[in-house]
Amino acid sequence: MELSDDALVLVAIMPKPRDMDIARLLGWYRIPLKSAPKILHPDVIAFYQTSSFPKGHKSQIECYSEVAGVELTTRAELFRDEPDHPRAHEEYFKIQLRSIENLPHSILADEWKRFTFFYTTGSRLYSAESIRGLAMNARERGDVWRVLREREEVYGRTPGMAVEDLPEVLPQDLLFLLGNLSLSGLELGTENSA
């Protein structure tokens, strides 16, 4: 898959190797509704592999996938063999994926190892050497926000999200509404046992 410079990329946590196996073999990735970005219309998802991955593969982004679709479901529907899981009835986004592709080079976390989700662009994904290199400037964030609002108008609101009630945002609100776009000094928790 050829990734365009202006592709809208959601950087998402890949908590465990098992989750990567699900993405590769079954073609989907899950995001808990309660921690998902407020608008979820990416072209691509890039997977940040946590410290639970083996040495040489942890705390970095090695691969991405084009998004084929998004649906709202429950954890019980995703994992039918785990009906008694404590979060079995919680809502999750099931992101349908096309093939998993490797980046030309890994994007290392350096000191940035904890965040939730954030948007970036295809050009930054291909050129960044570290997670910090994925952070966008103010103009790029404004462009991403406009694209997301346009997609919301075309595709409708993200299932389970009441984004039609959002006010026109101020710049300081932008980070919260889109996910954590900027990594400058923020240390945010990950969804470790989703």
Image (cartoon, rainbow, N blue to C red):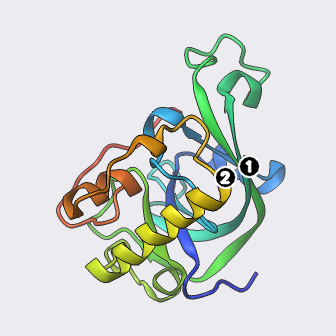
Gap between marks 2 and 1 measured at Cα: 9 Å
Question: Residue 97 sits in which quadrant?
Answer: bottom right
Mark 2 or mark 1, which has the lower sequence index?
2
- Residue 134 pos. (x, y %): 39, 76
Nearer-the-camera pick, 114 or 182: 182
Instruction: Tell me if 20 is positioned left or right of 130 in this view.
Output: right
* Image quadrant occupied by the N terminus: bottom right
At x 51% / y 71%, what residue is drawn? 147
Question: Which mark is drawn over residue 131?
Answer: none
120 left or right, relative to 158: left
> In front: 154, or 12?
154
Residue type indicated by callout 1: Trp
165 with respect to 110 (left or right): right
Frontmost of labels 2 and 1 is 1
At 40% from the left and 57% from the top, the residue drawn is 178
Mark 1 — residue? 28
Q: Is residue 139 visible?
A: yes
In terms of image quadrants, where is residue 63? bottom right
Label 1 packing within 10 angstroms: few (<14), some (14-19), many (20+): many
Residue at x 57%, y 45% (from the top left corner): 16
Q: Which residue is mark 2?
A: 20
Q: Is residue 103 above or below residue 55?
A: below
Q: Secondary structure at mark 1?
A: strand
